[in-house]
Image (tube, coloured by chain):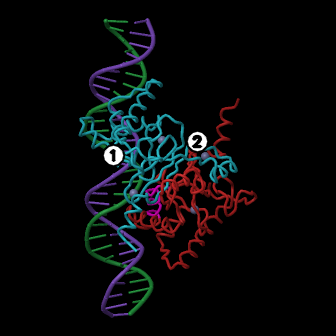
Chain colours: A cyan, B red, C purple, D green
Amino acid sequence: MTSESSSSNDLEGATTPVGFAHHDHDTCVAEGLAAAETRCEEDSLRFTPVRRKVLEILLQEHRALGAYSILDRLREEGFGSQPPVAYRALEFLVAHGLVHKIERLNAFIACAHPGEKHAPAFMICRMCECVAEAQSAPARGALGAAARATGFRIERTVVEAEGVCPTCADKVTKEVPA
Amino acid sequence: MTSESSSSNDLEGATTPVGFAHHDHDTCVAEGLAAAETRCEEDSLRFTPVRRKVLEILLQEHRALGAYSILDRLREEGFGSQPPVAYRALEFLVAHGLVHKIERLNAFIACAHPGEKHAPAFMICRMCECVAEAQSAPARGALGAAARATGFRIERTVVEAEGVCPTCADKVTKEVPA
DNA sequence: GATGAAACGTTATATAATCACACGGAAGAC
DNA sequence: GTCTTCCGTGTGATTATATAACGTTTCATC
Ligand SMILES: [Zn+2]
Ligand SMILES: [Zn+2]
Ligand SMILES: [Zn+2]
Ligand SMILES: [Zn+2]
């Protein structure tokens, strides 16, 4: 999931999960940062160096990073190296939808659809730990029905699927040939 | 959510979320333990005193308890009081579907539908911290579609909704009358 | 009763997250 | 401009959550 150059696939686009397919990764980072800058200017938010760096670190990966991994990289770049530095930046980025927390992993990942209003859902590969973001509509399923039936007011949802990504599934079948 | 006696509501049943409605709580605990015992006998699993106690502790609440809260109660009951004691019991109970982990809270709750095969979904009240379990069918939604489109194989899902339960919603409207 | 696997109790450690305080710089009031 | 206030940052310390490692006990099986 590091820098690659091949935008010849039809799996990308505004509402398509990114992460498993090859794609131009430098563009990923650049666009992510640009989108964040635009967003912050529009809303008069302060996109400070630390916040920008944390987002950049996360955009470099299509996997979730723990707060302390992020902190290590911040240290290398000369930023503060105590936990609150990372956690405060993450709090800001999550609050404004630029980063999501993966609860299952206690880790963080850059949003793949910044700007768009969305209820994210994630697919987490248990083998390579890569994470892809998709859309979810939990209010329109069994959960939504249960909420309406009981009078529960949903404000936020966590939807995370754990399994095996196509790349790892291929590897496995090749290692253990029939 | 402590002991109450009123089974006169139509919100209970195999596939109905429990937790917000009044119900006979002693029965909850007894039935939960009985179901676990049955299950363990059937599958030749060892339902040891520690495991039984942890499940009993969780059944007493319809909220999620952190591992260390559980540990405190184990200590009071004369069991081992070091973290691995609680975590090992929880690992067993989770592995066999008798307890679920609420990822959002890093906490654990007794299964409300033991025995039945199910993909649980949870509604978590951010005010009173009570948790209700419902069914989910994540493979049949936007997430399932995304998984099929990309070739991701879903093995397990985390579905947790955060919001306000009906009881707390009532309280709020009463406290701030128009 | 001997044997091996699983469960337990304990010590220590790793990982994740927050608290509390001091400092400095940007934004608004005057 | 200067003052004041708020917000973000850097740091040390602490709390909360989770696992590693090791020896002992318990149980099922032979
Ligand atoms: Zn997103
Ligand atoms: Zn993978
Ligand atoms: Zn359940
Ligand atoms: Zn509530």
Q: Which mark is residue A4?
A: 1
Relative to residue B170, is residue B39 depicted above or below?
A: below
- The image quadrant of residue B32 is bottom right
Which label sits on residue A155? Answer: 2
Quadrant into which the N terminus of chain B falls: bottom right
Element under disc 2: strand
Q: Is mark 1 within 8 Å of ligand 2?
A: no
Where residue A6 appears, as percent x and y from the top left, is 37, 45
| Mark in the foreground, 1 or 2 | 1
Query: Is there any visible trace of residue A84 in the rendered image?
Result: no
Q: Up-down: is A23 above or below B77?
A: above
Helix, strand or loop under label 1 = loop
Residue C18: x and y, percent?
Answer: 40, 41
| Residue B129, label in figure | none
- Kindly indicate whether the residues beneath marks 1 and 2 are on one polypeptide chain: yes
Chain that bears disc 1: A
Q: Quadrant of residue B144?
A: bottom right
Horizontal arrangement in the rendering, residue A112 relative to residue B171 (left or right): left
Magenta stretch, overall SS: helix
Name the amino acid, label 2.
Glu
Disc 2 chain ID: A
User: How far apart are labels 1 and 2 at the CA level?
Assistant: 38 Å
The answer, for residue A173, to whether it is visible in the render is yes
Q: Is residue A43 left or right of residue D21?
A: right
Q: Nearer the viewer, residue A107 or B10?
A: A107
Closer to the camera in the image, D1 or A89? A89
**Range of magenta residues:** B65-76
Disc 1 + disc 2, Cβ < 8 Å: no
Q: Residues within 10 Å of mark 2 (few under 14, many from 20)?
A: few
Q: At x 23% / y 35%, what residue is drawn?
A: A78
Name the N-terminal-most of marks 1 and 2.
1
Does the magenta-highlighted stretch encompass residue B71?
yes
